[in-house]
Image: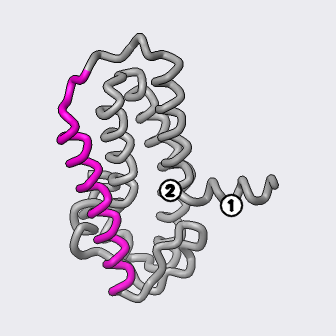
Amino acid sequence: MCRLIKLAFKLPAFLTLLFLSAMYIADVIVASFRIGNITSSYLPISILSASLLAIAFACFLFWKAKTTANPIVPTKASSLVTTGIYSLSRNPMYVAFTSVLIAFALFLSNPINLLLLPLFVFLVNKLYILPEEQALESLFADEFIAYKSKVRRWV
């Protein structure tokens, strides 16, 4: 069971689902912090739609480059993807996962949920981005260093 949990935490989507659950639980427990419907449902739906589209497009670019997007084994990457959405951010999928959380926080209209976002960003940096960057730098050396100097980690 412990091995399964460790494996689950290697998947950014699992961490995102965990934070979505935490937001829902926080909203239920601290419902008094709701500030009414501060946004129409169009804003959260728009953010969610854009986030899912960004994730799909990022995955498509990995598929097109015939390389892996699997965060469990970044050392199996066969090429460095630097075009499309990856020319704007080195981690567009993580930006999109964060945006999903923002959309859900807006949907719930409970600002207490926004307090979870910095923790999510910290964990994503520590658990996923830093190990991935180390793997990519060891695989692609100067090419990754040049890319890293031109494109920001988040946005």
**First of labels 1, 2 by sequence position:** 1
* Looking at the image, residue 82 lies above or below residue 46: below
Q: Is residue 53 above or below residue 138?
A: above
Say left or right for 60 vs 138: left
Q: Position of residue 64 (x, y in %)?
A: 33, 86
The x, y position of residue 33, in whole percent, is 39, 13
Residue at position x 34%, y 64% in the image: 55
Is residue 137 rendered to the left or right of residue 81? right
- Residue at the (29%, 50%) spot, across then down: 48
**Residue pushed farthest right?**
1
Q: Amino acid at mark 2?
A: Ala
Tell me if residue 103 is in the magenta stretch.
no
Q: Position of residue 117 (x, y in %)?
A: 41, 35
Please identify the quadrant where the N terminus is shown: bottom right
* Spot occupied by residue 11 in the image (x, y as percentages of width and height): 56, 59
Q: Which residue lies at the image location 35% right of the left edge and 17% below the top edge?
A: 34
Residue 133's tag is none
SS state under label 1? helix
The residue nearer to you, when weighing 65 against 135, is: 65
How far apart marks 1 and 2 lie (CA) works out to: 12 Å
Q: Which residue is mark 1?
A: 7
Element under label 2? Answer: helix
At x 37% / y 69%, what residue is drawn?
145
| Label at residue 13 | 2
Q: Quadrant of residue 35?
A: top left
